[in-house]
Image (spheres, rainbow, N blue to C red):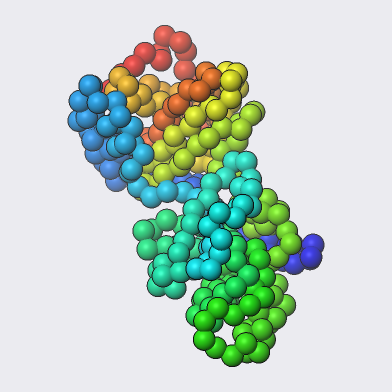
């Protein structure tokens, strides 16, 4: 099993060219123009409607979720899901979307909306032949697939041929069972999207010109220290839906992540937008410079 996980890591690095979902290298003037359009849209919402600004930010671009769950048509919707590792997010896909829209390129999974994922997780041990064949195609294209090994055929088809396909696919080493999601992501070279001293609740949306994080501190204690975002090449700013104010944040870009100073009170929510191209690898904002500005 260790050898299989190691080979998956190597395969992922070779086929993706070390590309990681959510990492942005911003170096075009076009992104600045698009960012201005994002800013103008945010400013156009009246001051009396903070929820409108919140909705605006939370609906731009496409969601970033490294884990894609496939529950299957026959699965128990009330069944407990595998734990999503801290620092990651997950999404679901139905059978029709899986068969018709899900594609793989360079080891990255893409759905019809343009969102991309790093691992497809199977939750049901009963699959149809079309779904099994689709999974086989995705795995052959370099997709990382994990989860429950199918044990039963759903719908028409030859049960023996179904089992032969399952055996062949699982022997290939392209599909993994019995390994934690964190181990699978680590082996595929996928780093956490957001790291903090204590767990936070967050959602991440990606646009060509920006990355938007909605972050909430669910704890009863304030959160202090730096947050580490899986975004590089852009300067972060705090966008306040309540006031419409925007202020820069101190940051430091290092390797694959950007460290941002953003303390959060108990229960506090914040929107961090990575927009303008970073012209330096670190920036320290003094208190006098943090007044709201547009």
Q: Position of residue 49 (x, y in %)?
A: 25, 26
Instruction: Determine if residue 274 is in view.
Output: no
| In the image, farthest residue toward the top | 288
Q: Is residue 262 above or below residue 151?
A: above
The structure residue drawn at horizontal position 56% and vertical position 38%, both measured from the top left corner, is 194
Using the image as rendered, state which of residue 287 and residue 181 is in the foreground.
181
Q: Position of residue 275 (x, y in %)?
A: 38, 36
Q: Quadrant of residue 45?
A: top left
Q: Position of residue 253 (x, y in %)?
A: 54, 34
Image side of residue 119 versus residue 206, left or right: right
Q: Quadrant of residue 16?
A: bottom right
Image side of residue 270 versus residue 120, left or right: left
Which image quarter is the C terminus in? Answer: top left
Instruction: Determine if residue 165 is in view.
Output: yes
Image side of residue 112 versus residue 177, left or right: left
Which image quarter is the N terminus in? Answer: bottom right
| In the image, farthest residue toward the right | 2
The structure residue drawn at horizontal position 56% and vertical position 32%, both measured from the top left corner, is 200
The structure residue drawn at horizontal position 42% and vertical position 9%, both measured from the top left corner, is 288
Q: Position of residue 90 (x, y in %)?
A: 53, 50
How many badges with numbers are in the image? 0
Q: Quadrant of residue 168?
A: bottom right
Image side of residue 233 versus residue 126, left or right: left
Q: Is residue 116 above or below residue 40?
A: below
The structure residue drawn at horizontal position 40% and vertical position 34%, both measured from the top left corner, is 273
Using the image as rendered, state which of residue 123 and residue 214 is in the foreground.
123
Q: Is residue 106 above or below residue 53?
A: below
Using the image as rendered, state which of residue 202 and residue 292 is in the foreground.
202
């Amino acid at each position: 099993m260790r050898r299989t996980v190691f080979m998956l890591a190597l395969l992922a690095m070779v086929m993706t060219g070390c590309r990681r979902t959510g990492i942005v290298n911003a170096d075009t003037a076009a992104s600045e123009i698009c960012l201005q359009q994002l800013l103008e849209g945010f400013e156009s919402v009246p001051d009396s409607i903070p929820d409108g600004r919140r909705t605006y930010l939370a609906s731009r671009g496409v969601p970033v979720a490294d884990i894609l769950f496939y529950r299957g048509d026959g699965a128990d919707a009330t069944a407990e899901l595998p734990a999503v590792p801290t620092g990651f997010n997950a999404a679901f896909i139905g059978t029709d979307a899986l068969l018709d829209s899900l594609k793989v390129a360079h080891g990255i999974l893409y759905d019809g909306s343009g969102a991309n994922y790093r691992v497809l997780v199977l939750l049901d041990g009963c699959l149809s032949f079309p779904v099994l064949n689709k999974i086989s195609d995705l795995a052959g294209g370099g997709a990382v697939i994990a989860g429950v090994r199918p044990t039963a055929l759903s719908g028409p088809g030859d049960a023996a041929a179904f089992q032969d396909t399952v055996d062949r696919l699982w022997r290939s080493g392209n599909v993994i069972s019995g390994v934690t999601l964190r181990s699978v992501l680590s082996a595929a070279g996928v780093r956490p999207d957001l790291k903090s001293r204590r767990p936070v609740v967050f959602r991440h949306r990606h646009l060509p010109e920006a990355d938007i994080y909605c972050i909430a501190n669910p704890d009863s204690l304030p959160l202090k220290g730096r947050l580490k975002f899986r975004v590089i090449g852009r300067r972060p700013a705090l966008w306040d839906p309540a006031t419409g104010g925007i202020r820069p944040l101190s940051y430091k870009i290092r390797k694959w992540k950007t460290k941002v100073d953003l303390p959060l009170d108990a229960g506090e929510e914040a929107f961090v937008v990575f927009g303008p191209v970073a012209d330096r690898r670190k920036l320290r904002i003094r208190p006098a410079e943090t007044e709201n500005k547009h």
